[in-house]
Amino acid sequence: MTHQNLLVELFVEELPPKALKKLGDVFASQLCAQLRQLGLASSDSVSTPFASPRRLAAHITHVAAKAVDTAVQQKLMPVSVGLDANGLATPALLKKLQALGADVSDPVFAVAALRKAPDGKTEALFYDSLVTGATLDVGLQQALLAALAQLPIPKMMSYQLETDCELPGWSSVHFVRPAHGLLALHGSTVVPVKVLGLTSGKLTQGHRFEAHKSPVHVDHADDYAATLLRDGSVIASFEDRRFAIVQQLAQAAERLGPGFEVLMDDALLDEVTALVERPNVLTCQFEEQFLAVPQECLILTMKANQKYFPLVDTQGKLTNQFLVVSNISPLDASAVIGGNERVVRPRLSDAKFFYDQDRKKTLESRVAGLDKVVYHNKLGTQGERMARVCAIARALALQLGGEALAEKADQAARLAKTDLLTDMVGEFPELQGIMGGYYARHDGLDADIAEAIEDHYKPRFAGDALPRNPVGVAVALADKLETLVGMFGIGNLPTGDKDPFALRRHALGVIRMLVEKDLALDLQTLVGSAVPAFGDKITDARLALSDFVYDRLAGSLREQGYSALEVDAVLALRPQRLGDVPRRLAAVRAFTVLAEAPALAAANKRISNILKKADVTGAVDAHVSELLLQEPAEQALYAAMQGIAPRAQALFAVGDYTAALQTLAALRAPVDAFFDGVMVNAEALDLRLNRLGLLKTLHQAMNQVADLSRLAA
């Protein structure tokens, strides 16, 4: 069997840059997966994706020219059904064989080719055949069509191709961009396939302006990347091109001096990598007067609008130098540099104009304008929303710091949304909150209030910083709670992967602030404090919202490395102080390594089951009469609990959850002895209730930190 490496390339017009990397990865992985299913590629075959602005390609190792033939054994029917009394084929058998493609022109011969074998209690007829393996030209055609159908194309295009036949006409083709070339090589041999109106060959195109040869001739599948680089001036690999950009950016910053650092984020790097075929980094600059504008505005317009890489100094302050990744490498780059500097100037001028105009009005003067901005058709305007956030923020701040904090939180919440009415935020919505902080400082407001306005959206994403001061924490909590309670109250819940109001992110933000700031706020009280602010606009959905928050908390904890059993044991108790959860988890983890832990967890589960069955009517309470303790084992357990339970309770009360659980380990022996020597469900009612009361007392003592029964195997 001949095995060679395979190369398939689809040459197209410029692909959407934000989708390019995923398109390239999916194209290669799907093509390889399809070939594996056909037996043309093996589990050892390795697929390497290539993706540039004008091509999607895949290199797959160890691909066979023809898949091996496969022996197939198929059960047909019981012998009694397939053969008559004379051993001849019945109509049912002949029909089945005909459906399988067997030759039934001679029924006697057809029956002779079958195999009889026992199948359980009966004897059955089996048809053995040999399925011919697919050839590469047929298999690749099938695999290529399937791979193209699986591409995550953001938006399909339709275009016309002249039909390849004697009759004149046009045919419609649907793809992400018009395709102009197809390359398919098995080793050095062209694999004849057709897709999107194209026929495969050995030719492709290089760089639009700087290719040394046109077209580029690829002799062998393994020479693809090297040939494109040499003759076409194209770095075909997305990852190699990205790495080259990172290196060039770092070198350009180093040439400027030790005080420069490039702002490189992954999203911008991926997008720029998808825009160039052979990168060339150039250094540009703009007038220093623009540095008077908040640097977040300048950085955003350079990155989002122009795809430039800003440069900052060692203190993180923006400089007037920036880097451009060009797709051409002229001997004299001055024209390219000058062109980019001219293009960015109007963008920066707009930002400066917006900033200057916005500062002519105070944030306070914009408050009334919030009444004209619709927030949600069921929840009213941004002005109404602001009033609700103020009420919630004041209530939270009173609990966290008293009247002084409440006054500041109320003022910050009142002004927090006013920057939505500014020109700068209208142009760059990503700057909401940030610009509010700048304008608050310009208006002479307290630093605490300005920081709170800036921080009230935090955390905006996973790993983002939390609000810096108590005012910001109160307003940020209020803002997120208002959204959560309001949306749950009108039934606007996230479904599947759809979450238009980012309720999952808001819930995680609330969780992070409660946990990482260790706030003395109960979740139930927290959610309850937000409900009255809505009046009759919503229904009370506190229970559903609490469940939602605990679900998000459970997922977050598992992502942090806690086991499902640990998380389940702690959250089963629905702890109201979320700041306690990490300490409870640490205590559970320390408890599980004790030798007594498995036995106590199993006993706890047994107690839970006993109480669940016995306490249907609510007759069992945590009360024990010493006079009714007759068996030595129950007397010993009660005595042990009298000494151990108060110590565990005292440790629990001061928050030493680890020591509290470890103290309970001493109960293992008396608990084991109790179950070995005492009949809980005694016939005498008073004895039975007393023993159930003893177990309930034990259950309560053991499950203050976590539900230990959830740890049982």
Image (cartoon, rainbow, N blue to C red):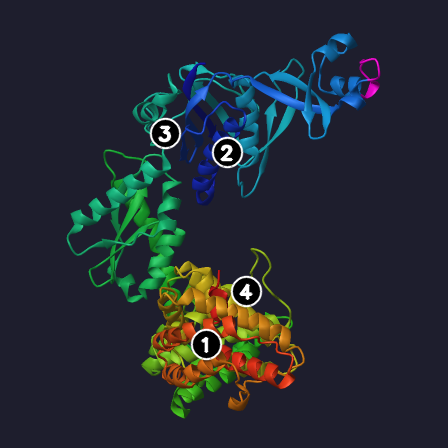
**Helix, strand or loop for disc 4:** loop
Q: Three-letter amino acid code at disc 1?
A: Met
In the rendered structure, does residue 254 fall within the stretch colored magenta?
no
Q: Three-letter amino acid code at disc 2?
A: Gln
What's the mark number on residue 207? 3
State yes or no: discs 4 and 1 in contact (Cβ < 8 Å): no
Residue numbers of the magenta segment: 84-92
Mark nearest the camera among 4 and 1 is 1
| Magenta stretch, main secondary structure class | loop
Mark nearest the camera among 3 and 1 is 1
| Horizontal and vertical percent position of residue 496 | 58, 56
State yes or no: discs 3 and 4 in contact (Cβ < 8 Å): no
Q: Which residue is mark 4?
A: 501
Q: Three-letter amino acid code at disc 4?
A: Phe
**Helix, strand or loop for disc 1:** helix
| Horizontal and vertical percent position of residue 691 | 56, 81
Residue 518 lies in quadrant: bottom left
State yes or no: discs 1 and 2 in contact (Cβ < 8 Å): no
Marks 1 and 2 sit apart, C-alpha to C-alpha, by 53 Å
Marks 4 and 2 sit apart, C-alpha to C-alpha, by 34 Å
Q: Earlier in the sequence, mark 4 or mark 2?
A: 2
Mark nearest the camera among 4 and 2 is 2
Q: Which residue is mark 2?
A: 30
